[in-house]
Image (cartoon, helix red, strand yellow):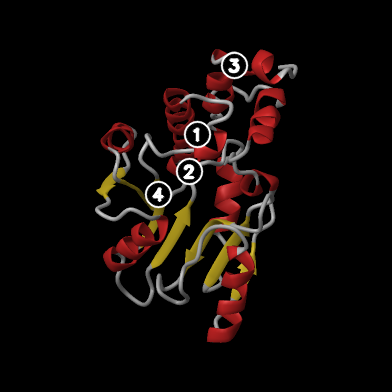
Amino acid sequence: MRVLAVPVKSLDRAKRRLAGVLAQPERAALTVAMLEDVLDACLAQARWELWVISRDEEVLGVARARGARPVAEPGGSLLQAVHQLESMVPGRTSRLAVLLADLPFLTAGALAGALARQAAVVAAPAGSDGGTNLLVRTPPTSIDARFGRSSYPKHRAAAYREGVTFQEVRSPELAFDLDRPQDLVKVVAAPPLPPGSGGRTRSVCLEMGLPERLRVGA
């Protein structure tokens, strides 16, 4: 069993670090756009089941419409969601990949390269704070999952401590997560993507007038 799972916060709680720039409905629209871009990359991965786990009915509806399995989350934190996923993916040979939903530059190729790694633990660090944007484990409980600031070195240390193989994935597509106002500047300044290659996040930012609001060129 191989499961690629994308956890998503409730839209009314999403991206609060952008509250100084975006109103709550705008943050919700941005979150959905990023999820759609991430799902584009995920749906291109052969032989992986795609799940989206969230407490938010709108998010689960997006997952259902895109052909992903919607998983209702009763808990209130990312780690609770990950523990729920671990319990749903049993077996020593099963693989569980947890991919964050705020990666607007993610491509199918970058994700495929990461998922092709064969170590017991594969992780992609966030470029901004040393967090973890992708964590793949075989089996799903080979090490404890940790997310948030500086979680990547903790995953690496845990793999060495448990005596399981570890590989890091360094790619700009997986490293860039949209959390801060300066990240919005990078998105609106990026060149348009080819048709069929995502780009919803940038389109939504342009529709909100962010180049003018942030005083950057588009």
Quadrant hosting residue 57? top left
Q: Residue at x 41, y 48 (%)?
A: 6
Where residue 86 appears, as percent x and y from the top left, is 34, 66
Q: Nearer the viewer, residue 90 or 102?
A: 102
Specify the label residue 206 is tagged with: 3
Measure how far apart labels 4 and 2 are at the Cα level: 7 Å
Where residue 66 appears, as percent x and y from the top left, is 34, 34
Q: Which residue is mark 1?
A: 34
Q: Is residue 22 above or below residue 5?
A: above
Residue 115 relative to residue 1: left or right: right
Q: Residue at x 42, y 24 (%)?
A: 25
Measure how far apart labels 2 and 1 are at the Cα level: 6 Å
Q: Which residue is mark 4?
A: 7
Q: Quick one: SS at disc 3?
A: helix
Which numbered disc flags the more N-terminal residue, 2 or 1? 1
Q: Amino acid at mark 2?
A: Ala
Quadrant hosting residue 198? top right
Measure how far apart labels 4 and 1 are at the Cα level: 12 Å
Q: Residue at x 54, y 14 (%)?
A: 207
Q: Are marks 2 and 1 in contact (CB under 8 Å)?
A: yes
**Image quadrant in which the N terminus is located:** bottom left
Measure how far apart labels 2 and 3 are at the Cα level: 20 Å
Q: Amino acid at mark 1?
A: Met
Which numbered disc flags the more N-terminal residue, 4 or 1? 4
Q: Amino acid at mark 3?
A: Leu
Q: Quick one: SS at disc 1?
A: helix
